[in-house]
Image (cartoon, helix red, strand yellow):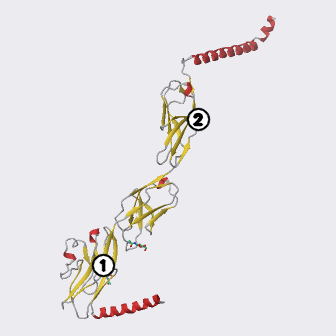
Amino acid sequence: MSVRMAAPLTLVLLLMIHRVYGQSGYSVSYGSSHICALKGSTVTMSCTYRYPYGSYVMMAFWTKDLIEGEEPTDLSVDPEYSQRLQYLGDKQQNCTVRLSHVTEKDEHEYYFKFITYTDSKWVGKPGVRLSVTDLQLESPERVTEGVSVRLTCKSSCNLTDTPTFIWYRNSQPLTERDFQNDRVYSLISRGDAGYYSCGVQGHDYISPAVYLDVRYAPDTPVISVSGSAVIMEGDSVTLTCSSDSNPPAEISWYKGTQHIGFRSIFSISKISFNDSGEYKCRARNEHGDEYSDPVTLDVQFQQGSGRKRTVITVVSGVFIIMLLFVIRLKWMNRIFPVNDYEVK
Ligand SMILES: *[C@@H]1O[C@H](CO)[C@@H](O)[C@H](O)[C@H]1NC(C)=O
Ligand SMILES: *[C@@H]1O[C@H](CO)[C@@H](O)[C@H](O)[C@H]1NC(C)=O
């Protein structure tokens, strides 16, 4: 109940103050008492002023230093401001001013002052507080594929003109515009990795880029075999195991169930018949591991290399001769069957 009473009471009080204030005939009112602007942007401080009927304004200017006992200086003659300040107002009632290319150095309270011919001076106090902010993109440094990620475009004060945020990945603007200063990826994927930055529509300023590292388990590794399709004894053979993963996977090689190597490239410089068999590789990182399909190495004998080859050559030679002999017998029987019987 007391709270409910408080509001109308304050209002009445304010009205009274306003009337007293207004009765002097002088007043300055600003469009907003606090402006938060993006670094490099142009700020318009809207302002109106009043003075008693019949007075005339001699001087009207903006200032930032209100020092007791000192005359405030006109910003338009301050070298720091003269090039960037534009008085849009008039000598009647409009005191709007525009300041371009704002930087953190411009963070001050600004006041409008006017002097009439009757030498009445009036400063609009409190003034307009200007805060200048840059943008910083906040994102987790690294995430695992599939999780939800929130990127936030942070400013040190809440931007006065409701901004539309533009997001960039690898300097390319992403097509969607955001009215919030954050952006959520509910299922982040490896394709979303990259350098992110953010900006505000209508302004050139862009935040420094932040790298978003998306980590994932290895894909099923694939083995590639270098060299000819037919592997002869004594050849050099290189097996390469490749798998996409982030961070890079540790590779292990297996022949059958036996562990035989660690690096992604497995080389056999002089392959022998005993190296024949099934080879597999495994890719592993902290997010998971996967085995490749096996690859079979079938090592052939080199001509004239060893006894086994000779034995096989001799055995197959004998077999072929016998085959020819049988064929020849059958063929002769067909051509000269009668003769054969006649001989009997
Ligand atoms: C003051 O002048 C500016 C620039 O001409 C204008 O945009 C603004 O609307 C004016 N304000 C008032 C209260 O007339
Ligand atoms: C900006 O606005 C939000 C919500 O309106 C508020 O929670 C936050 O404290 C404000 N930030 C600053 C720096 O004023």
Q: Nearer the viewer, residue 68 or 225?
A: 68
Asked if marks 2 and 1 touch (Cβ < 8 Å), the reply is no
Instruction: Check disc 1 and report the residue beneath it.
Output: 128
Image point (31%, 74%), residue name: 130
Work out how far the residue at label 2 is from the one at label 1, CA to CA, in angstroms: 77 Å
Q: Which quadrant of the figure contains the C terminus? A: top right
Among the 4 quarters of the image, the one containing residue 61: bottom left
Mark 1 C-beta closer than 8 Å to ligand 1: no
Q: Nearer the viewer, residue 101 or 275?
A: 275
In the shown orientation, is residue 289 left or right of residue 65?
right
Which dot, 2 or 1, sits closer to the camera?
2
Give the mark nearer the N terminus: 2 vs 1: 1
As drawn, which residue projects farthest toward the front? 2
Q: Which mark is residue 257?
A: 2
Q: Nearer the viewer, residue 258 or 93?
A: 258
Mark 2 C-beta closer than 8 Å to ligand 2: no
Can residue 222 be seen by looking at this rendering? yes
